[in-house]
Image (spheres, helix red, strand yellow):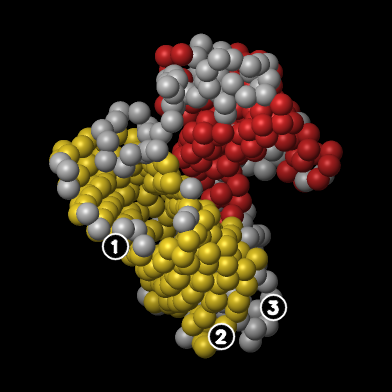
Amino acid sequence: MSHFCDTTNCKKKHFWRAVGETFGLNVGLWAFDRYVLKGHYSYISLKTIKANFKHGFDWDNDHLSTNMFAHPYHGSLYFNAGRANGFNFWQSELFALGGSAMWELFMESEYPSKNDIIATPIGGAALGEVFYRTSDLMLDNRTSGSERFGREALSFLLSPMRGLTRILTGEAWERKSIAGKEFGNPPYKLDVSLGTRLLTSHDNDCLLKAGASARIDLEYGDRYSSSRKPYDYFSLLMELNVMKTQPVFSRVEIIGSLFTKEVIDTKRCNLTLGLYQHFDFFDSDTIRTDYTPGVLEPCVVPYKLGTPASAGGGIMFGYQLPRFTLHVAGHVNGILLGGVLSDFYRFYHRNYNWGSGFSAKLKLKGSVCDDKISFSLNNQFYRLHSRNDWYSDKGYSPNPADPPVDVEGDSSRGTFYHLEGQIDYKVWNNLSLTARCDWFRRSTLYNRSVGISSSLSAYGFFIDSKQLSFQLLLTYSL
């Protein structure tokens, strides 16, 4: 018999320990930046702290991967400092917000960032709850020896703040008569895929680039059950590349339930309505070889997109026959904060526009012949609007090497579209052969004149770039 324990009922809240872990995380990270990396931003004093409060928040110009993934991951550590010390999802969000505010206002000499104070706690909650619940699957307080060490180590890697808390309290080695899982034994399906990836058709050029690829696809919980507890159901997709000029992390997607209500539950049909949080990250780099480094030109990079703060309504529908299953999921979301590739804005590490908008998603997934053959089709659309423009009548410099810092980027309407199809053929037990095709399109309509040089300018100008991706993978399912 599995033991079920809800963290809000069975774990005593330890406020000061959670605060201490959050504070210690910030001080430890600052010390590493200051004394090991010697980052210019880490030289802080009472003067820099006073300046931060006086100046207020700016849009910053870090890499997309820094602002859209690394900072939310940092927020997940704050979040799990609360989660590991007995606080529920919503209460732990306050630790993420507090930790982020402390870092922005006190721990850096750079002015605090508008985007960080949004993306770090909200995106951090999505990543944090996924990692916290995944780490819970690893733990078993009944074990000992090498098995116990392996489970604790893996759980620590997934959720470091939970692992630290278990070490501080002695839970990491205390043996008990029950497993002690906070969420019982929820159903889950994990697919791990390894293979190759081919990129082509970038910017209307017939260019090819190949490399290795890996995918992790996790579905946790029952997608059709009613629940008031956040993330009783979630899906996680991570895609990694080993390919020259391409980022290691090219895609991270999370859909987590916040509130769901099952309205149809029959032997063949299920229908659930709910509110879901979304975290989306798509990153790419150029595969072109016919460009001059340092020369500014549009569409050298095909696409970039991040939406760390997004939520909306969703529907889950399932239909099942003896040898056929079909699942349909549809979502419409508001995006509080997102970023999409810019053709013109260039400053420091940033080549994307901040904005807000909406997204729509439709996914079909099914199987035939007793799961011998599986298929999926996923269609995603994002639109982001950026308002304040670095090149305007306010006297901002049109030189992309020296724009003002506190801007969303180009005044524009950015669109990102992604269509993917996948077929799996089971070759042996849990092993399948997977073939995938992805089509990406990023397009931007610029609202005003954006001058780059005497030969390159845009006024109400529309630019788009496309990329095709093919993957052949071996998939192992758990």
Q: Please state which amino acid type lies under the numbered disc 3.
A: Pro
Q: Mark 2 = which residue?
A: 207
Of badges 2 and 3, nearer the viewer stands 2
Of badges 1 and 2, nearer the viewer stands 1
Placement of 324 over or under 299, stated as above or below: above
The image position of residue 244, as x and y in percent, is 67, 71
* Residue neighbourhood size for the residue with mark 3, other residues' Cα within 10 Å, grouped as few (<14), some (14–19), many (≥20): few
Residue sticking out furthest to the front: 428
Q: Mark 3 = which residue?
A: 293
The image position of residue 32, as x and y in percent, is 78, 38
Element marked by disc 1? strand
How far, Cα to Cα, is label 1 from label 2?
36 Å
Badge count: 3
Residue 381 appears in the rendering: no
Quadrant holding the N terminus = top left
The image position of residue 368, as x and y in percent, is 29, 62
Q: Mark 1 = which residue?
A: 368
